[in-house]
Amino acid sequence: MNQQYSSALLERAVDEFSKLPGVGRKTAMRLVLHMLRLDVGKIDAFTDAVSMLCHEVHYCSVCHNISDEDVCQICANPMRDASTICVVENVQDVMAIEQTMQYRGLYHVLGGVISPMDGVGPGELEIDSLVDRVAQGGVEEVIFALSSTMEGDSTNFYISRKLKDYPEVKLTMLARGMSINDELQYTDEVTLGRSLVNRVPFTGK
């Protein structure tokens, strides 16, 4: 046991918290000590919520968004516009777009973008399932809402080539209200909302 800790259990908890993104050991220590001051009931509720999250949360079988059921609430909502699919990188992007309240269509979560430097190729992403959705018919527009990075643009282009056999489907992209290299989830709601409403045809350039 590290000699700066008087308890092996405390050290273990700090080690686990420090594995979270953006959490260093000092922050982990503050979190652990805070939890020690809470009622046991609150701690149990916290650990139960985390356990259920890991064991019972699913990915939507249609769009791959996080869901409590096989099909997420967005895909299952008959009031959503099923003729429009917004392609995003991750679930955080779905949340960011939903917060703008400017979009009523469906989504498709790729799970990342094509990045050879990081070992991420098309086969690691949910691209084929997007093509399958378009092939089933009823889709009139696919919106590319990936981050305005080189990887995002390359992924847009790759998907556009995969959809070339469906000329009746309009391909659009967010208006460039965002700066180059901006990530969607960190763009403010007003800018993101305007970029979505004022989307432009995708030209592949």
Image (cartoon, rainbow, N blue to C red):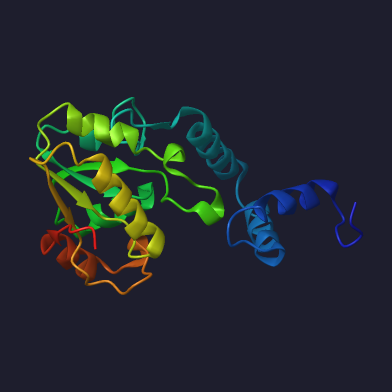
Viewed as shown, does residue 143 lie left or right of 47? left
Res 191 quadrant in image = bottom left
Classify residue 148 as left or right of residue 191: right
Residue 115 located left or right of residue 130? right
Q: x%, y% of residue 59?
A: 39, 33
Q: Which residue appears at 24% of the width and 63% of the height?
A: 205
**Vertical placement of 126 versus 97: above or below?**
above
Whole-percent x, y for residue 14 in the image: 72, 54
Residue 121 locus on image (x, y percent): 47, 44
Q: Residue at x 39, y 64 (%)?
A: 150
Using the image as rendered, state which of residue 131 and residue 41 is in the foreground: 131
Would you say residue 80 is visible in this rendering? no
How far across and down, in percent of the image, does residue 66 sit? Answer: 37, 38
Residue 129 vs residue 1, the one in the foreground: 129
Q: Is residue 204 above or below residue 65?
A: below
Q: Residue furthest bottom?
A: 179
Return the residue nearer the eye: 100 or 27.
100
Q: Does residue 194 sit above or below 7 in this rendering?
A: below
Q: Nearer the viewer, residue 154 or 193?
A: 154
Q: Residue at x 31, y 74 (%)?
A: 179
